[in-house]
Each structure stands twice: as C-alpha cells, then as structure tokens.
Amino acid sequence: SLKTPEKEGFIEKNIIKDTGKEILPRVAKEFLLMPSISATIDSGSDHVQRVCCQETDEVWVSGNGSVITRVDMEGNVREILHTSSGYVPHDLDVTEPGELLYCDSTEKTVNVVQNGKQRAFLQYQNWRPMGIAVTVAGEIIVSLYSDLEGCSKVIKYCLGRNEEQGQETLSLERLQPKLRKVIQYDERGENLYRYATFVAENGVNNDICVSDHGTNTVVVVNHEGKFRFVYHNILSQRKYDTFFPCSIVTDSQGHILIADGDNDCIHVIDCNRQFLCYIDNCSFAGVCGIDIDFADKLWIGEVDSGKIKVVEYLQLADE
C-alpha cells in the first residue's frame, strides 16, 4: 500500500529522497526491544493469504477463495466482493484515492475495484500477474511469470486519469495505465528473476524488492531496474535452516520486511541487505500476507487461524 510518513503528522527530523512530486519528511525510529501484538482481528475467513491496509483502521483480506473482504479493527465486515472470474486473487494493493487493485493470475489480469464495481485494466496473453504494489509516486509495479518461457519480469506503470469523460463516469473507468519500465535482465543480459511473486517499493530510495520463489531469495534493483543485491537465508543469523520469502513490505525507515512462509516469522533487513532482526516472538499461526500502515504497524494475516495480528515493532528514537 501507499506509505507516506507525512500522513502521521510528525515533525520533520530528516529528509528522504525526492520522489519527483515532493520531498517527504521522515521521523527517526528505532526497534522496540520486544515486538508486541496491539490487536488481533477475526477476519471472518478460515485462512488469510493476503492483507492490504486501508488507512490505519481497516484492512482488505483474501483467503483461498474468490472472496475479498474489508474489515475494521473490531472484525466488523465493511465490504464484501468477489473476483470477477471466480478465481483466487494472487495479490492486493490500494491506490491513494482508495481503489482496490488485485491480480488474477488465472485470467492473467489486474483488476481495479471501487464502490463495488470492477474491471480488468491490465490484461496479458502469456504472462501471469503474481504481485502488485503501489509506489509513493502513485505508480504501480506488477511482477509477472510466464509458464511458456519459464521466467519472470517486473513492469512499472504510470497511472493516468482521464478527466475528460465527466464526473458521472466512475473513476476507475478513467484509470489509464501507461507502461514506464520493464525490468527483466541484469547488465549481463541474464534473467534477474526465476519466479517473481510478491513485489514492493522501498519508499526511502525507490528500490524495487521482489520475492523469487524459484530461488527462495529476495532480489532488489534500483528505480531504474539495475541490480543491487540478493538477500537469502545465509545472510541472516541462520536461526532457521530454510527460507521461503512471501509477502514483502517496507517501512518509513527503509527497512525491508519479508514474510518467511517456512518458519512463520518476519525477516527485517536494511536497504543495503544487512540483516537486522527477526520478528518471531508473537506465535504466528502461518505467515504469508503482510502489510504496513501509515503508523508503521505491521499487519500479519495468519494462514492457519484466519486471524490478523497487528504488531508494533518500532518506536520514536530518543532525541
């Protein structure tokens, strides 16, 4: 989801990179000695595969079926919708104006939803959209996999909005994606990804982070698509023997948080690949989909329990 630190209303302490629209203030934060659960939400589903924050008090949730639900902090259902194809959505995100985006990897579409209405606004022939992320600048990043070619790529789109159709036209009909960048090969012409799935932008430096299920790694490139680094389990404290990277998010400090589906925990690294810590003390019942809200609270969907845990792991740094 779109994470801009200025929405928290904090006082500026330092500056992060100019995104092209404005320079965003960033407040210095530090890790809590022990992460803690601030809320547990019943999603109404038996399994939670994907979560996507709507502001700081609501979340979109999907499981093993075609249903996508928006629930509040008390577990009250605010909205229910079904994917247009009836298939399971592979990933979710929300634009700044509030449109829900989801990947239908079976129909090979990316769909946009608003006010209960939806349409496919990206369609592919031989590529399956696996992951989607909305950037700080309001663009979208889609990771794709080709069964025919056995490889992946990542595409960045600008989201134009045609305002000439009049106010009576549903805003999602005015959403016009325009291809900006295709990221597939490194400087030697070799594939960057084998099986790209989840994707995220680091709002601090605009790096693009991708979990690769073909190599069980996280591949990071810069905003131009140039290779920066690969993170794998060997670079952690090796507390766990295996590593299966699922959903990826980044916070206001530029930390990269990676859901580890093998070990039901979160790996936290910095924007230069340095391992920082695990978040593994909250007894998560199956981890796959995660998100971070504007207040840097981590939302974790539990695959096995159907619950969502909201975790606090950062605090304001001392002056």
Image: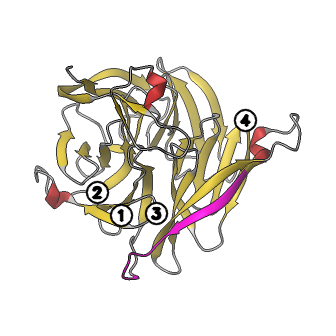
Task: Using the rendered view, name the quadrant where residue 124 is placed.
Answer: bottom right
- Residue 181 counted in the magenta span: yes
User: Disc 3 marks which amino acid?
Assistant: Glu
Q: CA distance from mark 4 to mark 2?
A: 34 Å
**The residue stretch that appears in magenta:** 176-189
User: Residue visible at 39% across and 75% down?
Assistant: 186
Quick one: label 3 or label 2, which is nearer the N terminus? 3
* Other residues around mark 2 within 10 Å, as few (<14) / some (14–19) / many (≥20): many
Quick one: label 1 or label 2, which is nearer the N terminus? 1
36 vs 252, nearest the viewer: 252
* Other residues around mark 4 within 10 Å, as few (<14) / some (14–19) / many (≥20): few
In the displayed structure, 167 sits above or below 211; it is: above
* Other residues around mark 1 within 10 Å, as few (<14) / some (14–19) / many (≥20): some
Q: CA distance from mark 4 to mark 1?
A: 33 Å
Mark number displayed over residue 224:
3
Frontmost of labels 1 and 3 is 3
Please give the residue where the numbered disc 2 appears in the rendered image. 244
241 vs 16, nearest the viewer: 16
Please give the residue where the numbered disc 4 appears in the rendered image. 116
In the displayed structure, 187 sits above or below 49; it is: below
Q: CA distance from mark 1 to mark 3?
A: 23 Å
